[in-house]
Amino acid sequence: QVQLVQSGGGVVQPGGSLRLSCAASGFTVDYSAIGWFRQAPGKEREGVSCISRSDGDTYYVDSVKGRFTISRDNDKNTVYLQMNSLKPEDTAVYYCAAGPYRCGSMWAEDIFQIPGYWGMGTQVTVSS
């Protein structure tokens, strides 16, 4: 049974940092990319970042470039999202996603159109 178990998140002041984790297990077929998307109240879902399983290439949506860093620990089959310099507009529920996706500008399109696996989501709130 495939599981994406998320941890991290919480409440932080603007300018603060948080780290999200996503531990993947149960895959019988290797996923091609894993990463994160988010949904804020009243807004559309947004693909935030991903990392390719084969070559480690990464992708970031423009709004988080230079602030967020995605990484992976292959031994633990875990992916991380380090979020620095957080802004109120980063407030959202963050979801981990893994599947036969392309990691790049097509990340958001793929995760919402191609069957894969999503975590349960974790709330990130940036507020003073």
Image (cartoon, rainbow, N blue to C red):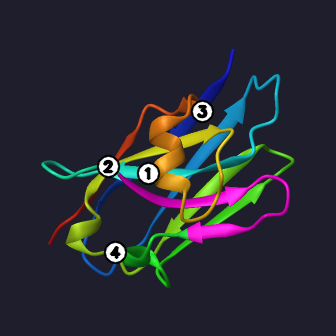
Residue type indicated by callout 3: Leu
- Asked if residue 27 shows in the view, the reply is yes
Please give the name of the residue rendered at 81% of the width and 35% of the height, measured from the top-left corner: 30
Asked if the residues shown at circle 4 and circle 2 are in contact, with their CB atoms under 8 angstroms apart, the answer is: no
- Cα separation, mark 3 vs mark 2, equals 19 Å
* Mark 1 or mark 2, earlier in chain: 1
Mark sitting earlier along the chain (3/2): 3
Give the image location of residue 78, x and y in percent. 71, 47
**Would you say 22 lies left or right of 36 here?**
right
Considering the whole magenta stretch, tell me its main secondary structure.
strand
Q: Position of residue 58 (x, y in %)?
A: 66, 68
Which residue position holds label 3? 4
Q: Quadrant of residue 104?
A: bottom right
In the image, the segment drawn in magenta is 46-59
* Horizontal side, residue 5 vs residue 109: left or right: right
| Residue for badge 1 | 37
Residue 121 coordinates in the image, percent (x, y): 40, 38
